[in-house]
Amino acid sequence: PPYWESYRERMYKYIGDPRTEDGMALLAERSPLTYAKDVTIPMLIAQGENDPRVKEQESQQFVDAMKENDLSYLYLLFLKEGHGFARPVNKQVFYGAAEKFLSDQLGGVFEPLSSEQVDKSTLADSSKEELASLDGFVTNQIDTN
């Protein structure tokens, strides 16, 4: 983002300068994408469409690598959100999805979401479909909140 400009050179020094061959090698070595094939546990990946730090394309590359390596994941893309979720309904849907994800992976209980809650969120259609496919997670109950 533009507000990083004042310390861009310092960041390049510490994390890798994309203008040099050595810097690009260092960035590749430190990139999560480099290690996506090594993931051994299911992952929950949630992305804000307008995130200035982690671009949607970068999350999608990681999801594609996991898919390519037949690894388990749940990917949620929230439209009109940035780095962190500002809209209360999106927070509610994210925390509910995280609760369901952890319940599936570790055991335990979860509270289902209503289809109304999911519809009110800014989730991308593909993410809404993914949540709807989770056993018992999205119900047709009316949300009274």
Image (cartoon, grey):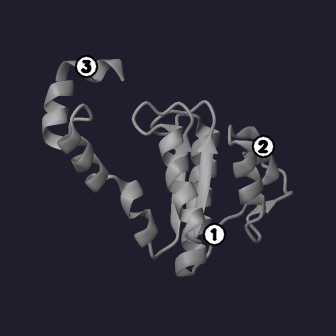
For label 2, the SS is: helix
Q: Residue at x 71, y 63 (%)?
A: 112
Q: Amino acid at mark 1?
A: Phe
Q: Identify the residue position indicated by label 1 in the image.
A: 110
According to the picture, the residue beneath numbered tag 2 turns out to be 119
Q: Residue 71 sits in which quadrant?
A: bottom right
User: Distance between the Cα atoms at labels 1 and 3?
Assistant: 43 Å
Is residue 32 left or right of 89 when viewed as pictured? left
- Say which amino acid is labelled 2: Asp
- The Cα atoms of the two marked residues, 2 and 3, are separated by 38 Å
Q: Residues within 10 Å of mark 3 (few under 14, many from 20)?
A: few
Between 59 and 22, the residue placed more toward the observer is 22
Tell me where residue 123 appears, x and y as whole percent.
Answer: 68, 42
Q: Is residue 72 left or right of residue 7?
A: right
Q: Quadrant of residue 130?
A: bottom right
Task: Please give the residue where the numbered disc 3 appears in the rendered image.
Answer: 5
Residue at image x 27%, y 55%?
Answer: 29
- On the image, the x and y values in percent for residue 41 come to 47, 75
Q: Nearer the viewer, residue 55 or 34?
A: 34
Q: Looking at the image, is mark 1 or mark 3 earlier in the sequence? A: 3
Characterize the local packing of mark 1: few (<14), some (14-19) or many (20 or more) Cα atoms within 10 angstroms.
some
| Cβ–Cβ under 8 Å for marks 1 and 2 | no
The residues tagged by marks 1 and 2 sit, at their Cα atoms, a distance apart of 19 Å
The quadrant of the image that shows the N terminus is top left
Callout 1–callout 3 Cβ contact below 8 Å: no
In this rendering, the answer to whether 116 lies above or below 29 is above
Of circles 2 and 3, which is in front? 3
